[in-house]
Amino acid sequence: MLGGNEVKAPRGTQDLLPGVSEKWQYVEEKLKEISSNYHYKEIRTPIFEHTELFQRGVGDTTDIVQKEMYTFLDKGDRSITLRPEGTASVVRSFVEHKLFGLPNQPTKLFYIGPMFRYERPQQGRMRQFVQFGVEALGSADPAIDAEVISLAMHAYQSLGLRSLKLVLNSLGDQESRESHRQALVDHFTPVKDELCDDCQQRLEKNPLRVLDCKKDREHPKMQDAPSILSYLNEVSRSYFDKVKAYLNAMGIDYEVDPNLVRGLDYYNHTAFEIMSDAEGFGAITTLSGGGRYNGLVQDLGGPETPGIGFAMSIERLLMALEAENVALPIDERLDCYVVSLGEEASLKAAAIVNDLRQAGIQADKDYQGKKFKGQFKTADRLAAKYVLVLGDDELANEQISVKNMETGDQESVALANLTEHLQALL
């Protein structure tokens, strides 16, 4: 918002400043490393897509499509939307580039990047937020459901989170869902007028979404709503049992919650959420969620292809780390700082810093014309591991003084050997 001469970031967005951005970098690198260990490859899709993709892919009855999308007409009068989630874009790319034709299947992908939803900003819920997610396309094996869940749990645990709860449900196949859908309609229709406006519409278009309502969650009819688990046919029940068997084999704890539904239209069979039990984490405990979506590839013009995936918010992950007082192992100290006295020494210092950087050593120097004492203070503030001192005497002898700031030990090193010497020390 523009006020006077001051320009501020738009509501629901944030600047990640140095000191915070390092945490993001650490977490993102860790997530990429874990994805690689599970043999998932990175995919990068556009930040904006044709609006129709999300109407078809996410579903017309969802809150995302109905209320939360940033949609606008471009200069060619085409309707464009900033992506509100990652799965639809990944599946669109999978279909467009015919990845289903590759010899190695399933296609295992991960993404990380900003998403956009017009929501009321609150702690851990922004209008621009960063999501990490994985998608496995091309396998109907319950083992891959367990693998995807395992990757999500492993990601949180490897970053140091302990207060985690995995909640699981089955939404069944098409036949099971149809039976359950009718049971929900029969259950809620007598009290339809008591439900919120959104739920009255959902009851006609997508009754499963009524169970996900935040406004009506205390309504008596919610407590005894028909459970999807009572309507699973033999195929769906067997599938769910196998997913649980794989999780048991991997030693992954979970609890089954028949009321767990995901907010997007494309889910079937396995649905799951991972929550934080940490004290002080906040009212919204969900860290990530996902599930199986066997019809989405066909909906977007591809061949019949099963898929499963999940997405996690990096903001909420960092909040959970904070709630559990997990300190990330980030070394913010500077390798070395060059202190120079005199014009000639300053020239040489610039060359030394440049050479060290080329050799992969983190180095810096003074750029504000500070005196000797001021340069040392800067080195101290930057927590430099080594301070290199260069004056007229050192220049004349082609030497430089190297001081270990932790021990206070100091030694003279030939300028010609400096890079090798520091590489050995560091």
Image (spheres, grey):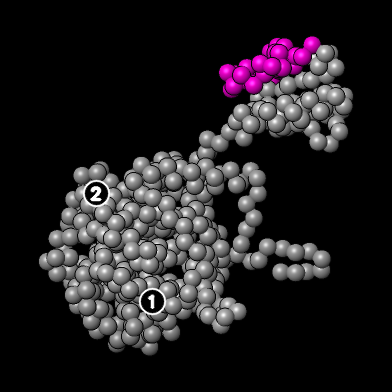
Instruction: Identify the residue under disc 1.
Output: 56
Instruction: Identify the residue under disc 2.
Output: 247
x 59%, y 21%: residue: 423
- The boundaries of the magenta stretch are 397-426
Residue 413 within the magenta-colored segment of the rendering? yes
Q: Nearer the viewer, mark 2 or mark 1?
A: 1
Horizontal side, residue 28 vs residue 362: left or right: left
Mark 1 secondary-structure assignment: helix
x 18%, y 75%: residue: 175
Residue 92 at x, y = what percent? 39, 67
Q: Can residue 71 be seen in this view?
A: yes
Q: Give 378 or 296, whichever is nearer the viewer.
A: 296
Q: Is disc 2 surrounded by few (<14), some (14 to 19) or many (20+) residues within 10 Å?
A: many
Q: Residue 289 carries which label?
A: none
Horizontal side, residue 119 vs residue 200: left or right: right
Give amino acid for label 2.
Leu
Instruction: Looking at the image, tell me whether mark 2 or mark 1 is earlier in sequence order.
Output: 1
Q: In this view, does 351 lie above or below 114?
A: above
x 52%, y 54%: residue: 315
Give amino acid for label 1.
Arg
